């Protein structure tokens, strides 16, 4: 285990908790709900009748929330993966470090963990997409000067579906 993971464990951001293995499917369900919300918000931009029915102005654009929901779908998927191997995380960076440690570097703790991931190991690019989504979500959520474009929203939407489908394969 890396020094950074040990440090985050000592600081209480990461914990080894075998009871969390039972939560992986719940996290996956949460990820799927976030995907639905993301899709609804994305579709809202292009459905004039729905916008009229809900009394939503033409100026309203939901792209930033598409990015935010896409990121949180991916993050819930990441939590599903780390809980599957008996870990909990209270921090986004800590979660990414755990994914890299146990799914990218393939440092297997025991035979059970190996069996969980042997048939569907995440590629490094997929983890990087989660990190990129986090960055875009932060821009969309906290910045008032940067525009979140339709292109970014569509990229996150595609990446979120791909990431969650891969997580579902593993779980």
Image (cartoon, helix red, strand yellow):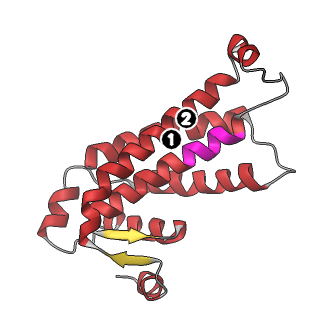
Q: Which residue was labeled with disc 2? A: 37
Single out the residue that lies furthest toward the left: 111
Work out whether residue 125 can be spotted: no
- Magenta span includes 68: yes
Give how far across and how far down residue 95 sits, in percent. Answer: 45, 66
Residues at badges 1 and 2 in contact (C-beta under 8 Å)?
Answer: yes
Identify the element where label 1 is drawn: helix
Image position of 119 with respect to 110: above or below = above
Q: Quadrant of the N terminus?
A: bottom left
Residue depicted at x 80% and y 54%: 143
Image position of 129 with respect to 84: above or below = above
Q: Which residue was labeled with disc 1? A: 34
Residue depicted at x 25% and y 62%: 21
Residue depicted at x 42% and y 77%: 14
Residue depicted at x 34% and y 50%: 26
Rate crowding at label 2 as few (under 14), some (14 to 19) or many (20 or more) other CA atoms within 10 Å: some
Horizontal relation, residue 29 to residue 113: left or right: right
Horizontal relation, residue 75 to residue 68: left or right: left
Image position of 92 with respect to 126: above or below = below
Work out whether residue 137 can be spotted: yes
Horizontal relation, residue 101 to residue 57: left or right: left
Single out the residue that lies furthest toward the front: 54
Give the CA distance from mark 1 to mark 2. 5 Å
Instruction: Return the residue nearer the eye: 45 or 4.
Output: 45
Instruction: Answer with the quarter of the image where residue 163 lies.
Output: top left
Give how far across and how far down residue 71 sits, in percent. Answer: 56, 49
Main secondary structure type of the part rendered in magenta: helix
Image position of 161 with respect to 9: above or below = above
Identify the element where label 2 is drawn: helix
Single out the residue that lies furthest toward the top: 49
Give how far across and how far down residue 45 sits, in percent. Answer: 70, 24
The magenta span reads 64-71
């Amino acid at each position: 285990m890396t020094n950074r993971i040990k440090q985050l464990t000592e600081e209480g951001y990461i914990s080894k908790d075998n009871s969390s293995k039972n939560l992986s499917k719940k996290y996956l369900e949460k990820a799927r709900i976030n995907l639905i919300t993301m899709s609804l918000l994305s579709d809202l931009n292009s459905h004039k009748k729905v916008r009229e029915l809900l009394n939503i102005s033409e100026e309203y654009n939901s792209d930033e929330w598409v990015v935010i929901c896409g990121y949180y779908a991916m993050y819930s998927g990441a939590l599903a993966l780390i809980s599957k191997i008996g870990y909990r995380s209270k921090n986004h960076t800590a979660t990414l470090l755990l994914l890299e440690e146990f799914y990218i570097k393939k440092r297997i703790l025991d035979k059970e963990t190996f069996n969980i991931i042997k048939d569907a190991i995440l590629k490094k690019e997929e983890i990087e997409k989660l990190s990129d989504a986090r960055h875009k979500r932060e821009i969309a959520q906290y910045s008032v000067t940067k525009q979140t474009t339709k292109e970014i929203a569509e990229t996150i939407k595609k990446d979120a579906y791909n990431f969650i489908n891969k997580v579902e394969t593993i779980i």
